[in-house]
Image (spheres, rainbow, N blue to C red):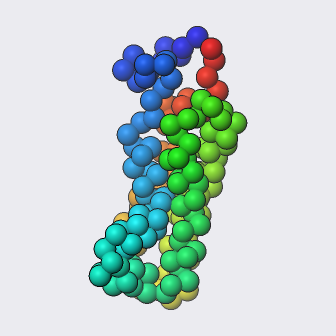
Amino acid sequence: MKNIDFSPSAYDGHGRLRLPFLFWCVLLLQARTWVLFVMAGASRQQGDTLLNLFYPDHDNFWLGLLPGVPAVIAFLVSGRRHQNPRLWAAMRWALIAAQLVLMVWQPLLWWQGEPLSGIGFTLVILDIFALWWLLSNRRLRACFLPVED
């Protein structure tokens, strides 16, 4: 039986809850290093300059790819979430764990001597908001529950 807590427009043609728009924004935020990697690869001439602008220390770039892995997997699995319900249910907790890592990572870099920047500060604020949203949004939580037929 469908949950009646959400409006009918929140469901797709198969009766499953649609993922909220903000979910896709959180995935992009978590996979920001992956997005930068793709952009750098697409712009062959300025790719190295782009990577050096955001990641002067190349070790931080490779480490930055790790917290984005759950977001990339969630993006890939989201279209077939009904076929892998256990994996999909675990993805919410993997995204929350990755968001915690991202939220702590930037202040840790500042503590190790990296200069404070507006971009870094903005990312920390966005990371805090994303973590709060992942933990508190009822519709998103319901999207990760197994579908009852």
For the point 45% across and 35% down, the residue is: 19
Vertical order, 9 against 85 (above or below): above
Where is the N terminus found, in terms of image quarters?
A: top right
For the point 52% across and 54% down, the residue is: 72
Asked if residue 16 shows in the view, the reply is: yes
For the point 48% across and 19% down, the residue is: 14
- Give the residue at the far right of this rendering: 86
Q: Nearer the viewer, residue 1 or 117?
A: 1
Vertical order, 134 against 52 (above or below): above
Where is the C terminus found, in terms of image quarters?
A: top right
Q: 84 left or right of 105?
A: right
- Give the residue at the far top of this rendering: 1
Q: 36 left or right of 104?
A: left
Q: Position of residue 23 (x, y in %)?
A: 44, 43
Rendered image quadrant of residue 40:
bottom left
Count of marks, rendered view: 0
Q: Position of residue 96 (x, y in %)?
A: 59, 51
Q: Position of residue 108 (x, y in %)?
A: 56, 77
Asked if residue 124 shows in the view, the reply is: no
Vertical order, 22 against 15 (above or below): below
For the point 57% across and 63% down, the residue is: 67
Q: Position of residue 15 (x, y in %)?
A: 49, 18
